[in-house]
Amino acid sequence: MDVIVGGEVDAYCTACKAMRLHNVIAMVATRPARVACRSCQGQHAYRARLPGEKAPRKSSSKPGAASTAAQVPTETFYARIAAGERDAVGYSPNDRYVVDAVIRHPTFGPGIVIALPKPQKVEVQFESGTKLLLHDRAATPMLNLQRPVPRPVVLPPIQDIPTEE
Ligand SMILES: [Zn+2]
């Protein structure tokens, strides 16, 4: 996030006597040297912080730095995994899942069901990415997952057993 001439920067305005958004007028090396206040249009030397304020803590003086990376899904992912891990069930294509269920896959590890895009397909977010898995297969007889009917055992007729004289 480099500051450029004409770019915006948060700075202390000597006229407003407060932190204001400024446009950069001039730069010295990589720092703004002269800025124009967007509130009062006054131009003055760049001051990164309020008078008397101590040196910046890490990243607090970076102009435009995002406060928290809300778009990063992993933090939410891990939080939800941690919250749901106790109730996590082992993944099986025969089981039926609902959105937000936490499951445990033998290969991909813990994951969260994020969508049911079509029948018997479940979209799961794992640490390594999103996977489309089978589920609910036990519900459909045409998938041949029923137990085979045991065949009757055929015994030889008893009268056919040869007897010795
Ligand atoms: Zn101002």
Image: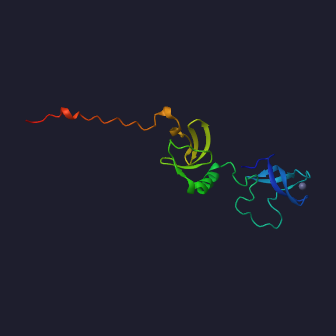
The percent coordinates of residue 51 (x first, y second) are 83, 65
Name the residue nearer the viewer: 136 or 105.
Answer: 136
Name the residue nearer the viewer: 63 or 81.
Answer: 81
Tell which residue pokes out farthest to the left in this image. Answer: 165
How many discs mark residues in the rendered view?
0
Specify how the rendered protein is coloured. rainbow
The percent coordinates of residue 119 (x first, y second) are 58, 35
Q: Does 14 sit left or right of 68 as displayed? A: right
Q: Does 146 sit left or right of 69 as displayed? A: left
**Above or below: residue 60 compared with residue 70:** below
Q: Quadrant of residue 82?
A: bottom right
- Kindly identify the residue that appears in the image at 72 percent across and 63 percent down: 57
Image quarter for ligand 1 = bottom right
Q: Does 4 sit left or right of 137 as displayed? A: right
The percent coordinates of residue 75 (x first, y second) are 63, 53
Q: Quadrant of residue 113?
A: top right
- Kindly identify the residue that appears in the image at 9 percent across and 36 percent down: 164
The percent coordinates of residue 22 (x first, y second) are 84, 51
Name the residue nearer the viewer: 106 or 163.
Answer: 163
Image quadrant holding the C terminus, namely top left
- Kindly identify the residue that appears in the image at 23 percent across and 33 percent down: 157
**Above or below: residue 149 compared with residue 113:** above
